[in-house]
Structures are given as C-alpha cells and as structure tokens.
Image (tube, rainbow, N blue to C red):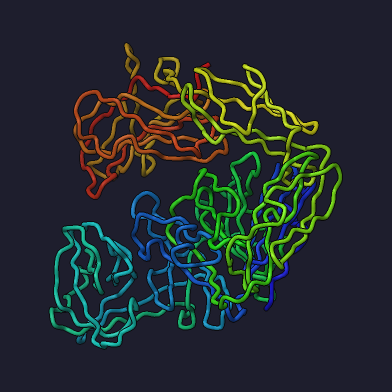
Amino acid sequence: MSLPALPASLTPPAPFPIVITQSMTSEFVAPGVRRATYRLQTSNGPLVINVVAVDPHEPSTHVRAVLAHDRLVSSGETVGAMARRTHAIAGINADYFDIGNTNQPLNLVVRDGALLRSPSKRVVLDVRVDRSVHFENVALSGALRFGMSMLPLTTINEWPPQGGVGFMSEAYGLAKAAPGVRIAQLVPVDVAHSPFHPTGAFRIVSFDDATRAHTVHGYELAFGPAALALGALPAIGDTVTVDLATTPTLDDVTDAVGGGPMLVSRGVVVDDPNSPAPEERDRRFPVSGAATLADGALLLLCVDGRSPLSVGLTRPEFAALARGFDAASAMAFDSGGSAELVARVLGDAQPSVLGKPSDGEERAVADGLFIYNDAPVGPAVRLVVRPESIVAMAGARVAVRAAIVDAAGHALGPAHLAGGDVVRVGATSSQMTLHSGMLGTNVGVDVVDALARLDLASETRHPEPGATIVLHASGFDARGRVVTIGPSLHVRGARGEIDVSQPYQLGNHDERLEARAGGARTTLEVRVGRHSEPLRLFDPAMATAWSFASAPTGIAGALAFANDPPELQLPYDFTRDQRAAYARAVPGFTFPGEPLAFAIEVEGDESGVGLRATFVNSLGETRALTLAKSVDWRGWQRRAIALPDDLTAPVRLTSLYIVNALGPHPVHMAGTIAFRNPLVTVAGRP
C-alpha cells in the first residue's frame, strides 16, 4: 500500500499571498488515498485548502468520470450525490456546463473508454489504461461514409448539430426541438457493438424531422442545415460507416473530463490561450482543480472562497498553489459556487463535503472526477475518534464520536467509548488514551489560553420577525486552528446575556449581538425581516449615467427618458443584425444594505423579446438575471427577481437589456421597452 506524500507546510511562490501562519491535518482515506486540510493566514486573508492525494497505480484504487444522472443533459447532480450513488470514496466537480438550461458539460467526456461528447478547445484531464493521468487539448475529426458518398462528422452528442453531421447516443438525454434538423435512427450492424461507442457500421432504420423534443434512444445521426446543404443523405436501409479520429488519440484513454484553464505544464506556470472567462483571471474565487506530481500522484484541490473564513484565490494564485505542492502539471475545473471536493472521512461509511461550498449548499453540476477503491472488507484494526485531536480552551466539554475501521478504511460501525462520549478539557495540554473494547487510540488535547479570532454566525441567513435562530461561535488560534471555546464564551444582545447552546428568539427589528472569549471580540448584525426601498434610477439627474449599447457593437441607438413618473425607454431593432440592446450604467447603481430582490415595472409590447438585468457583487463578479423570458404582455407589468446569495453586498445594477431570444425562436421585430418604479428589497428592519 502506498500513500502519496503531502507537505507539512505550504510555501507557494508569488503571486500567492504571503503565508503568515498555517496548520495542516492529514488522514488516510483508503489504500493509495490520503486527504489533508491546510488552514492559512495570509497577507490577503485566511484560506482553507482541502486536498485529496491519490496514487493511481495502487491496484485497488481507480479514477473515473461520472455524469450527473448518467446523462449529458440532466437536471444536474451534486458532487456528493454522484459520489454516494456510485459508491466513490472521493470526488471533485469537473467541467463548465450549460448552467440552468441543459446543464450539459461543455467539453470532452470519456467514460469507461466510450467517447460521450466531442471536445472543445479547452484542456481535458484523461486517465489511461496504464492508470497514468494526463492533461492535454484534444481535437476531433470524423466522416460519415455511405456508398460512394462522404459527409463530415463534426460533433458527438452536441445538439443541435453544427457544421457537419452530429452523432447522438443514449448518453445525451433529452434533445429539444430543432426545426431544420433531420434525424436518422441507427442500429449497429455488429450485434456485439460496444454501448455508446460512436464508431463502426450502422444501418439506418428511420428518418424524422426534429420538430419536437425527444429523448435519444440508441443511436442517431443529426443532419443540420449545413450538413443538408452538402449533398444527398443516405436512405432508410442503407449501411453507413462512422469514422472518428482524435488528436492525440484516445485509444488508450479510459476516462476523461474537461475544465480549464491549464495552470502548470512541465513544472512551469502557463497562461492558457483557451482559458474560459479570461476577464475573471484576477478575481478571487472559490477554486477547484487537479494536479499531477513527478511520481504520477494525482492531487484533487479545492480552496474555499467568498467567506470570512477563506477568501479564495485568483487563477495565477491557484497556479502558484499547485507549484507549492510541486505539481508537474495542473489544471482548473469549474469554480465559484461549483467548486466542491468530497471524501470519505475515516470512520464514516459515506463521503462528505470537505470545506464549505460558497453557495451555502452543494450546487448541482454536470460531471466530476471520482476515486474508487475495491479493497475487500477486512477485520477491525483501528479505533477512530472524532475529533482526532482536541484544540480547546480550559473547561470546555468536547463531544467525541468513535467508529471502528478495517485496514482499507471501510467503516465497520460506531463504537462506544469507555468513560462516555464527552471529553472534559483541563487546565493544561495532555495526551489521552480512549478505549472501546480491545481497541484504543491516543487523542492529543491542546489547551489554548487566547484566541486570535472569534466569529459569531447564525444558521438562518434572513430570519423573519419573531423567528428562533441557532447561533454558533467559532474560535481560532494564532495558527488558524479551530478552538472549542467552552464556558469562557459570553454573548450579549439588547436583552442581556445569551446562552448559545439554546435557540435564541428574535424580536421585530434588527439586533446587534456581541461575543467575547479568550481576549477576542466580535459582533453579529442580525437583519430581521425585510423591507423595500425605491430606487431613483431614472430621475432627470441620473440620465447622464445611462448609455445605449448593442450586440454586436456599433449599432446606433439612443435612450429616452420621461418624467412623472420617471421612466427609461430602451429601443431595439431585431429586424437585421442586432441581437441585444442595452441600457448601461457605469460604474452602476449601488443598492443599499444587503439586497434580496429587485423589482421594476415594464411596459410590454407583446413582441416576445427577452429581458435581463446585470448585477455586480462585492468581488466584481457579474451576474445576468432574467426579468422575463418573453415579453408576452402589453402595458405595464411589475417584474421581480430574487437575487442569489453569491451577489454579496455591496451590489451594483449595471444594465437593463433586451435580447432577441431567450427561447428557441428569435424575434425579428423593432420596438421600445420602457422601465419605471424600480425597487430593491433589503434585509432587515432598523
């Protein structure tokens, strides 16, 4: 059994922020698999970094790709759910995806040797038959041959087909209606044809138009307008041959997932020309990715972000972190709210989330890279106690739980400790030996006299008046370790001392709570309920802050304003090349407080155009939200949208805009949409 080595401390090169203090905990997961958590205090703020290290050559350990619900098009699935469903011991989110629509990954997918989706220009991670892991860019070429004819085959499971012919398999899922597309249903000529594989000889059994949504069953060929214009199609009963080639070849690849950008190649940090969203290169995010070391070990990396406990990293900083692990190669995966790493904690039967997803909960994603171990269950060899070491203030009572595991890390069930499941912390540091039957383990108790930081938080983000909330106080020492506080914690509110071990009932207005322990103090502003505030966005004095823009750029247009009440009038002309018309505000209008929702009155024209608004959060990240998928009304109507949690305050409104399509059919009309009476709903009742 081999376990990849992980450094006891991190010293990543610039531009990684200067590390001031740090702590690291590491634990066995399964043969060839180890996990670790690093807590850093840096010049940019705190960081929580979780790592799963894998020896791909360990015979009982396997690395595989997983699709959400085993389909490219789905409702999405969380990393945790995919891990539990497929009995993985660890896993990480992978590719960027068509979020909120089809949720399909946007790059190559190979699963169990079958090519399920054609590649994009972005980097992919692939696992080969010899178990080695590689990062590379993949290109696809293909042809459909029948009789003396040939048509280019350009995509695998991309819908609707672009350019040439598209090959579709059951792995795709639900295909939307696509007028102008012809579908040929196929059956393999070879009855032993490998499932999902797109190459080989097939017979056409039927043709149909894609005028209705349908779920792909078996195999299909999709002929879009470009392919139909190239020449005659094969006929029902014809045998067609699908030839495919990739550069580099995927013949020895068992599994692959996409992502990007490439961060490190041959031990050198690189600037990937195919980087997704290059404008976000220097923004600090929760980030996830993968790296390989010189000895072939695979690292799955996830850094928490958008949190007071972990500020996240920019892409160059993430690349520097990979080099801090001495990575020979590294790439990023989809990050932000999608960044998530799960692993089995020793003693648990199922994997759990390492760190905290920035959405506050797991986000449903398109696919992931997962680790499996098929070592057989063996006899009990170890008693595992949680927490494995205790860092606490004197007098604290620390609840512990125990489990029994075998040599491969399989959980064999809970254990009952002699002396009970609560450890009472004394005045000095010590080493304790805990027993359950014939098994025992040592637990270190480190007594901390002073806290470097104290945090107070509520489980409920936006409580209503009179609601009951649960408070949590978290202490941290100078090394960034979490400290159990105990009786030295004191929390006060407007009505006196608060016992955080009991639910706390709020009043009808905002409350300011103060906590102190170990020489540290902190406050928590509890925003109770919500209220609405009018926004004076279209007053005459604001007219110069707005400007007209279009997509594509350069199309002429002008905004108009009216008074009593103030309104903004945005013209559009989709009869030619224009696809979108914008009313833009630079640098934007900052909302008061912690905004929860935005509402505005819209004068509709029954045109069917789509309406959206863009917002920028405290980190400079832009979110486009839909006010109306289709303006199917005439006259004034109020439209309201909830603002997602990742729009952290202060929030700015930067544009209102009209698009020619948020559905399957673009609008070819010209007109004007007017806006008035904008409101923001803000947390709290002062």
Residue at the extreme top of the image, as rendered = 564
Res 417 → quadrant: bottom right
Q: Quadrant of the N terminus?
A: bottom right
How many marks overall? 0
Q: In the image shown, does 87 or 196 lie closer to the viewer?
A: 87
Q: Residue at x 33, y 71 (%)?
A: 154
545 to the left or right of 271:
left
Q: In the image shown, does 421 or 106 lie closer to the viewer?
A: 421
Res 116 → quadrant: bottom left
Q: Is 628 above or below relative to 401? A: above
Image location of residue 169, percent across then percent down:
29, 71
Residue at the extreme right of the image, as rendered = 428
Image location of residue 627, percent across then percent down:
33, 34
Q: Is residue 14 visible?
A: yes
667 to the left or right of 446:
left
Image location of residue 305, percent across then percent down:
60, 46
Q: Is 54 above or below relative to 536? A: below
293 to the left or right of 20:
left
Image location of residue 149, percent across then percent down:
22, 82
Q: Residue at x 69, y 65 (%)?
A: 437
Q: In the image shown, does 335 or 682 lie closer to the viewer?
A: 682
Q: Residue at x 76, y 52 (%)?
A: 23
Q: Is residue 298 visible?
A: no
Res 71 → quadrant: bottom left
